[in-house]
Amino acid sequence: MRQLVQLNKAYPEIQELGGELLAIHLECIPAGSEVAKKKAKLEFHLANDDRLQVSTAYSPTSAYLVGLDGRIKARWLGAVHDRVNGQAIIEAMREE
């Protein structure tokens, strides 16, 4: 949850740079993701992966910066306690 709160703080600057943020929450039911979004007062989209389809195909701790052309511009393959922070995303967006 700490990462989501931290990303929420960076979200306005990500938007100023023309970006959008989507996080995928691993929760057993979609309602749990909605509770997490409300509890953390998240402004960005929080999708649910209750069937673990996305986390099976990708690392559950990974993050990707996707350009408007659909290509991956940057990726972070973190560990459970070492996930990407908003500043790293902002810096990668500025490099584009």
Image (cartoon, helix red, strand yellow):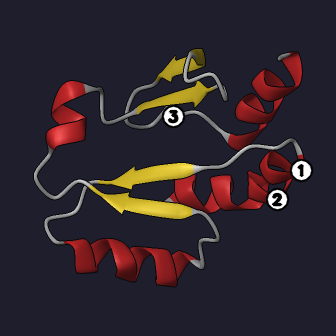
For the residues labelled 3 and 2, the Cα–Cα distance comes to 19 Å
The image's mark for residue 12 is 2
**Quarter of the figure that contains the C terminus:** top right
Q: Measuring from the top left, give residue 18's x and y in whole percent.
A: 82, 44
For the residues labelled 1 and 2, the Cα–Cα distance comes to 6 Å
Q: Measuring from the top left, give residue 3's x and y in whole percent.
A: 55, 51
Observer-nearest of 42 and 22 = 22
- The residue singled out by tag 1 in the image is 16
Q: Measuring from the top left, give residue 22's x and y in whole percent.
A: 52, 51
Query: SS class of the residue under badge 2?
Result: helix
Q: Measuring from the top left, give residue 15's x and y in whole percent.
A: 80, 52
Asked whether, in this view, residue 73 is left or right of residue 13, the answer is: left
Amino acid type at circle 1 is Glu
Observer-nearest of 75 and 5 = 75
Amino acid type at circle 3 is Arg
Seen in the picture, residue 24 relative to 17 is either above or below; the reply is: below
Query: SS class of the residue under badge 1?
Result: helix
- Answer with mark 3 or mark 2, whichever residue precedes in sequence: 2
Query: SS class of the residue under badge 3?
Result: loop
Seen in the picture, residue 84 relative to 78 is either above or below; the reply is: below
- Answer with mark 3 or mark 1, whichever residue precedes in sequence: 1
| Pointers 1 and 2 in contact (C-beta within 8 Å) | yes
| Pointers 3 and 2 in contact (C-beta within 8 Å) | no
Q: Nearer the viewer, mark 1 or mark 2?
A: 1
Mark 2 crowd level (few <14, some 14–19, many ≥20, 10 Å Cα): some
- The residue singled out by tag 3 in the image is 83
- Taking the spot 65% from the left edge, 52% from the top edge, the residue there is 7
**Picture quadrant of residue 59:** top left
Mark 3 crowd level (few <14, some 14–19, many ≥20, 10 Å Cα): some
Q: Nearer the viewer, mark 3 or mark 1?
A: 1
Amino acid type at circle 2 is Pro
